[in-house]
Image (cartoon, rainbow, N blue to C red):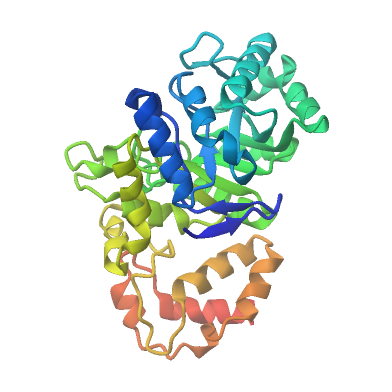
Amino acid sequence: MRYRVNKKTGDKVSEIGFGSAYIYEAGTKAAVEAIRRAYDGGINYFDMAAGDGRAFPMYGEALSDVRNNIFYQLHFGADYSRGTYGWSLDLDTVKRSLDKQLHDLRTDYIDYGFIHCQDEDSDWETYQRNGVYDYLMKMKEEGVVKHTGLSSHTPLVIQRIMDEAQIDMLMFSVNPGYDYGQGDYAHGGVDERAEVYKRCEKEGVGISVMKPFSGGQLLDAKRSPFGQALTPFQCIKYALDKPGVLTVLPGAQSVAEVDELLSYYDRTDEELDYSVIGSFAPPQANGKCVYCNHCKPCPVGIDIGLVNKYYDLAKVGDTLAKEHYSTLEKKASDCISCGHCDDRCPFGVKQSERMTEIKSFME
């Protein structure tokens, strides 16, 4: 397992986390074994937007003895007060649901308390008017909530709430389907979504990734909006390459499925290569580097994807990006304009020309 640090909180978070949408369907024994296997495999970040309240006692049984070694993100607005999942902006309902979740998880604190599922401006306005946000912040002042987060599928709403609220972690739906305008939650254009990634990286807000497989659609050629299947490993790599992303949250219902996810680190570069998405990227994405590194190897050893990422971040004011760039052994100025990267880029980026642009800006 590899880990990334949330710059806002200092927490060391596993790159692969654990989503809880369907774990309850496995039954208690299988679920507890799967959750514990995830922990034993190095996963330390668990999202609790579960599909049913039955999931919480399963986590309590599996992880209560290692509670201080893991992170839970709980959602202020996900309602389990009646057992099954619901969504509520009513303050009393939110309180009852959270009390039940904490009891079932066998814990008395929340690592990341999330403003839950804000997809419209009206959601955020109601959330504040009903006192749910004030309650979340009160729990933070009292130490019950350690850090605050936001869950949303909508870039413009994310930008507004990040302007107005204290956010340490963003839960966002990241996959090539949504980024390219395909799927039920494909909110925002290519540039709007990219701005969210870059802002999070610049401000040190970590991103935990929900729906990395677009609800399984991207893994099935018949259901995929592109008519071509990707592998789970391509989707995970795609998400982890986005600026700001700390952890990807796929689900699993058995030890075997957990082991399959953990085998991500045994995959070859070819198995992780998601550059095929260039063949179905929309016109507005053409000519924009997505850091896929399909252009490798560079004859002089430039990490072209990383150079591009630092440049894009520096352009939006991320001073650390420029500092990180300065430490690279090979920079844009080392480019010999051989054109190898231009020929290989599936997104039509003229990297040899871009290296000149990057050199001018960064050096």
Residue 345, by quadrant, is: bottom left
- Left or right: residue 197 versus residue 110 is left
Query: Does residue 22 appear in the picture of this structure?
Result: no
Instruction: From the viewer's side, name the closer residue of 287 and 238.
Output: 238
The residue located at (30%, 67%) in the rendering is 268
Q: Is residue 127 above or below residue 178?
A: above
Residue at image x 50%, y 89%? Answer: 334
Counting from the top left corner in percent of width and height, residue 74 is at 60, 30
Q: Residue furthest left?
A: 222
Q: Considering only vertical position in the picture, is 239 above or below 78?
A: below
Q: Residue furthest right?
A: 141
Which residue is depicted at the point 20% across and 48% down?
228
Q: Is residue 325 visible?
A: yes
Report whether 240 appears left or right of 77.
left
The C terminus lies in which quarter of the figure? bottom right
Q: Is residue 157 left or right of residue 185?
A: right
Which residue is at the far front? 65
Is 64 above or below relative to 175? above
Q: x%, y% of residue 115?
A: 64, 29
Task: Identify the residue at image location x=33%, y=49%.
Answer: 259
Horizontal side, residue 218 vs residue 243: left or right: left
Residue in the foreground of this view, choosing between 63 and 354: 63
Q: Position of residue 79 (x, y in %)?
A: 55, 16
